[in-house]
Image (cartoon, rainbow, N blue to C red):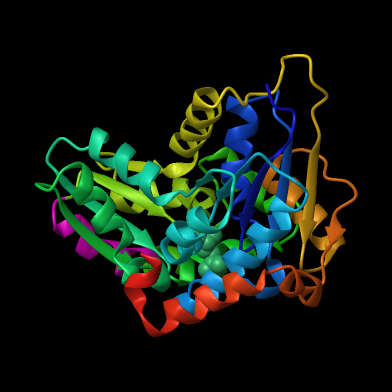
């Protein structure tokens, strides 16, 4: 038994879709969620830069301490999972492998589409993860960076809007221009005959109703959140690190951005009240990264294979 919390982080609010799934699957576990909203989005950034953020936030979480770290961000996972697993003493779980596994299990025609940020798609992380499980699968990947903006700006719209999206009601509020943008992105994937589409960004489950409408009901959408929660449960179970059924459950939040805004918008995603969000200044975060980790980062920048 281990009553320490699980640490979960993302560039911002998108990772709350994963945190919510972990809360549902593991109701006795405490969670510390870190949203790096001051530096969101990660998607267009250089992978070396994102790798540094992963180490900084991982060090902050490890310092709490936590018993397991979830990189609830595809871009962060693609850039820094292997490095984080080597740097930290606790297990580190990413979202790419669980999403790839769920997609391979779901596809019958072995034609799988993946959408994500530029960083995730250009890293090739999903293609590699899918081929590790079934080398006969053909993966069709497209970066859809504007979807992150749609979610971020949608979250900032008036009350009701996001709830409409989340409720997947027939009169969801989405600007008509979204559908044209989505068709431009997704039509080539549809034409390639995929039967499964991975939402390879933790922001995208908030758009799943609209994306489903564009790709059609014959395409199964995969969000890695559920599969990641399962992997967290398995990892804790194997190590006998589950919390006791009667342990006091805490859910804490921290952000590099505006704490009040995080509480307001995060509550809309999680559909639960969020109080007392801690603000973590970027300088404080950077100061936590051990000198050896910074040296490793430098090696990664000059010699890519050092961090794979
Ligand atoms: N939530 C991040 C991911 O899963 C995307 C948002 C961003 O670009 O920071 O990749």
Residue occupying the point 76% across, 74% down: 287
Taking the image as shown, residue 213 lies to the left or right of residue 286, namely: left
- In the rendered image, residue 203, in percent from the top left (x then y), is placed at 53, 56
Q: Nearer the viewer, residue 14 or 150?
A: 14
- Image coordinates for residue 259, horizontal then vertical, percent: 84, 61
Residue 11: image quadrant is: bottom right
Q: Residue 268 in the image: x percent, y percent?
A: 72, 47
143 is higher (above) or lower (below) than 202: below
Residue 16 position (above or below residue 262): above
Q: Is residue 176 visible?
A: no
* Residue ranking furthest to the front: 292
Q: What is the span of residues highlighted in magenta in the rendered image?
A: 182-193
Left or right for 159, reference 39: right
In the image as oriented, which residue stretches furthest toward the top? 246
Q: Predominant secondary structure in magenta?
A: helix
> Magenta stretch containing residue 43, yes or no?
no
As drawn, is 122 to the left or to the right of 268? left
Residue 221 x, y percent position in the rendering: 35, 43
Q: Residue drawn at (82%, 40%), measured in percent from left and top?
A: 273
Q: Residue at coordinates 40% horizontally, 85% vertically from top-left?
A: 302
Residues 81 and 296: in front is 296
Vertical comparison of 233 with 37: above or below: above
Place residue 108 in its image quadrant. Answer: top left
> Per the image, is 189 magenta?
yes
> Residue shown at 71%/63% (left/top)?
156
């Amino acid at each position: 038994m281990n009553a320490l919390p699980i640490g979960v982080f993302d560039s911002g609010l998108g990772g709350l879709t994963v945190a919510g799934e972990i809360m549902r699957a593991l109701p006795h576990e405490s969670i510390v969620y870190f949203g790096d909203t001051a530096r969101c989005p990660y998607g267009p950034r250089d992978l070396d830069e994102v790798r540094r953020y992963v180490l900084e936030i991982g060090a902050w979480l490890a310092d709490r301490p936590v018993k397991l770290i979830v990189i609830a961000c595809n871009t962060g996972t693609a850039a820094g999972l292997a490095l984080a697993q080597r740097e930290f003493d606790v297990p580190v779980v990413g979202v790419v492998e669980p999403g790839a596994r769920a997609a391979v299990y779901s596809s019958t025609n072995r034609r799988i589409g993946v959408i994500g940020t530029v960083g995730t798609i250009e890293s090739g992380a999903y293609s590699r993860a899918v081929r590790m499980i079934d080398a006969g699968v053909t993966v069709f990947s497209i970066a859809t960076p504007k979807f992150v903006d749609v979610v971020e700006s949608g979250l900032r719209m008036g009350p009701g809007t996001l709830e409409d999206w989340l409720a997947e009601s027939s009169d969801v509020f989405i600007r008509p221009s979204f559908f044209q943008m989505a068709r431009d992105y997704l039509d080539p994937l549809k034409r390639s005959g995929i039967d499964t589409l991975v939402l390879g960004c933790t922001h995208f489950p908030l758009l799943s109703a609209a994306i489903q409408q564009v790709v059609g009901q014959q395409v199964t959408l995969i969000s890695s959140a559920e599969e990641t929660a399962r992997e967290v449960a398995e990892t804790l179970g194997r190590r006998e690190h589950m919390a006791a059924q009667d342990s006091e459950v805490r859910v804490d939040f921290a952000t590099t951005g505006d704490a009040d805004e995080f509480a307001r918008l995060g509550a809309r995603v999680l559909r639960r009240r969020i109080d007392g969000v801690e603000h973590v200044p970027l300088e404080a975060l950077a100061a936590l990264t051990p000198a050896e980790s910074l040296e490793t980062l430098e090696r990664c920048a000059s010699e890519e294979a050092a961090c794979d």
